[in-house]
Amino acid sequence: MIGIVVVSHSPALAQAAVDLALEMVGETPPPIAIAAGAGDGIIGTDAVKVAAAIDEVASGEGVLVFMDLGSAVLSSTMATEFMTTTDEVRLTDAPFVEGLIAAIVLANAGASLDEVDREARAAMGAKQSQLADQGGAAAADAALAAEAPAAAAPAAPAADGTSADPTEVTVEVPLVNPDGLHARPASLIVQALAGVDAKLTITDVTAGKGPVSGNSLIGIMSLGAAKDHVLKFTATGGAAQQAVDTLVTMTGDGFGELAS
Amino acid sequence: MSTSTISLDQLIAWLSRFRDLVTEKQSYLTELDSAIGDADHGSNMVRGMNAVVEKIGAEPATAADALLKSVGMTLVTSVGGASGPLYGTLFLRMGVNAGPVTELDAAALGAALRAGLEGVVARGKAEAGDKTMFDAIAPALDAWDAAVADGADVAAAASVALAAADKGRLATEPLVARKGRASYLGERSAGHIDPGATSSTLLFQALDDTVSS
């Protein structure tokens, strides 16, 4: 599993962002270390602390570093000169909160440094997609930008039914949970598909959005699929049927949200 | 000939004098930074340089490289703001360039400062006119090198470098910031002298005070 480092001027900000992200995953989160504050309650960053945090979470599969702004970036670049690990260390320009959430979910599913970084950097997509519904020129731009996550994690086979892949399985089901396909169910989907030998895409048939990759938290969230929308799951690969069955069951159960 | 080179003790005196100057000018640095930044440059530099003076007093260095690297690492871990990695890099690179010597002549000190500035540029990606510490240090070192080429010793070089740094510092006033927190202000950053260029000028003021006294 890759390691994640969170660099902030404020220990409280870093801890809160990590806590928020950890709500998305189970009891075995990926290695995460915080490097925040400059000691003695001073708001700021310290390159030596950042280097120590990188070394702490490096386990051979790479480390992704999130930063808030300004000196956090300078201290992190400097930290790459102080660290002792030989792991690949990537400083990501992903948004601090959204990117961290996306990264922790995907890292927890065992994704590579490249995959996690790409997903994290596309993490503004869900919010941009949500706000695009507000209308206006800026929102239209945002809607275009929101295409990024889908493009970043493209659906391998065509989702238009013309695929010749004999393993392809397609099922359409309605969303029954009241809050639709928000962050938590999206996270459950990504985790359920982790390690499954299938490429699965999700389309919001009702809204005409997608397909997006079932491995992309942000992609799924960018659909903004609401209750009663019909979702189409399309999967290919050795475990295509199993993947679709799993999602149909989860969707039918309202992602565990029906009782509450 | 006492000022033709700078000794280890004078390097230490320079750092101590820099601490005194940033302390003396703390409120002025903070005032400049409150106009275009987050109002912490004065307190950050004072905290950092107090830590430096304490550190080099507790663990006396026996060569310029060890001294300057110790200064750099102390700033990195004690300043907090962007000045930490920036000034930290300046001194770390100066130390690497200076090597394990106990005195530096004007050319060697100029080369060490130049290496430090190159480190700052690599770290912060600042260019001339971005309204940063670069705008004081770069002209100071150009003046330094020109003076040394004409045969100046450390004292003479420090004197012209200070004048150039101060001129560069004052010239940041009309500039629009393109780096750091001030860059968020865009056009509104114009009309204020850059705090980083000001503290960098104090670095040359401290050097001039040290080698001319």
Image: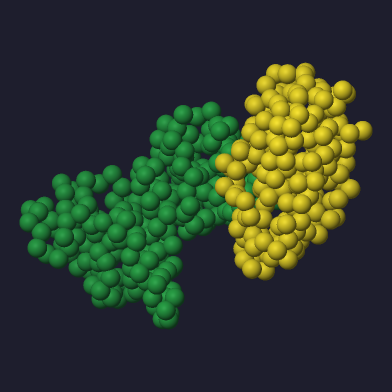
Q: Specify the quadrant of the image occupied by residue B106.
A: top right
Left or right: A253 in relation to B192: left
Q: How many marks?
A: 0
Residue B100 at x, y percent in the picture: 70, 18
Q: Estimate the x, y position of residue B22 in percent, counting from the top left.
A: 83, 46
Location of residue B200 (image quadrant): top right
The residue depicted at 57 percent of the width and 47 percent of the height is B125
Which quadrant of the view contains residue B101?
Answer: top right
- Residue at 73% from the left image edge and 51% from the top image edge: B168
Q: Quadrant of the C terminus of chain B?
A: top right
Left or right: residue A229 versus residue B189 is left
- In the image shown, does A225 or B61 lie closer to the viewer? B61
Q: Position of residue A46 (x, y in %)?
A: 65, 41
Q: Position of residue A21 (x, y in %)?
A: 49, 54
Front residue (pair B27, A246): B27
Question: Could you tell me which quadrant the N terminus of chain B lies in?
Answer: top right
Chain letter corresponding to the colour yellow: B
Chain A tint as drawn:
green
Residue A15 visible somewhere in the drawing: no
**How is the protein colored in the picture?**
by chain
Q: Residue at x 32, y 56 (%)?
A: A152
Residue extending farthest front: B150
